[in-house]
Amino acid sequence: MKLLNRSGISIRPKQPFYEWLQANFNEELPTFEELCSEGNIYLFDEVESEEDFSSALDQHWAAILENELGAWDEFGDCWPELTRATFDSWLAVDLQLMSFDLSKQSLMRADLDIG
């Protein structure tokens, strides 16, 4: 097991995100409960306090929102206004202070062109 020098946040959709999906995509969607059963984790530089989390979120909320929306609408044709208020009302955030890697395999990295 390895301790990573990263903290993070777990992101799950809220009801407004799901309503956006229903309004804009004709494909068969998972239920809201199914969509919420999995989330995404975003890692950033290790932090020590809740204030540090707040600063990290202030720095990264737009990239996170773009990534979450882009998973459904790659070109941004149907995106809502990208504001912090949209982020806060559309996405649930859980703080993750420490990150552990249980794998014996090397960590894979792939740079994504976001924003």
Image (cartoon, helix red, strand yellow):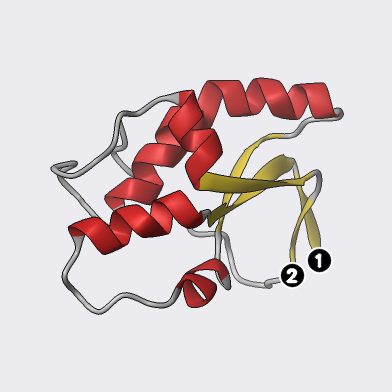
Q: Is residue 23 above or below residue 96?
A: below
Q: Which mark is drawn over residue 1?
A: 1
Marks 2 and 1, how far apart in space?
5 Å
Task: Work out whether residue 111 can be spotted.
Answer: no
* x, y percent for residue 40: 53, 57
> Which numbered disc covers residue 102?
2
Q: Residue 32 location in percent, x, y?
A: 47, 70
Mark 1, other Cα within 10 Å: few <14 / some 14–19 / many ≥20: few
Residue contact between numbered discs 2 and 1, judged by CB atoms under 8 Å: yes
Name the residue rendered at 31%, 75% in the picture.
Answer: 29
Q: Quadrant of residue 36?
A: bottom right
Q: Is residue 82 visible?
A: yes
What residue sits 50% from the left and 31% below the top?
Answer: 61
Report the front residue among 21 and 8: 21
Q: Residue furthest right?
A: 49
Q: Nearer the viewer, residue 49 or 87?
A: 87
Q: Is residue 108 above or below residue 62?
A: below
The answer to whether 37 appears left or right of 110 in the picture is right
Q: Secondary structure at mark 1?
A: loop
Task: List x then y, in percent, for residue 54.
Answer: 70, 25
Element class at badge 2: loop
- Quadrant where the N terminus sits is bottom right
- Residue 114 rendering spot, x and y as whole percentages: 31, 37
The residue that appears at 73% across and 29% down in the rendered structure is 53
Viewer-proximal residue, 91 or 19?
19
Instruction: Identify residue type, mark 2.
Output: Leu
Pointer 2 or 1: first along the chain: 1
Query: Which amino acid type is shown beneath numbered disc 1?
Result: Met
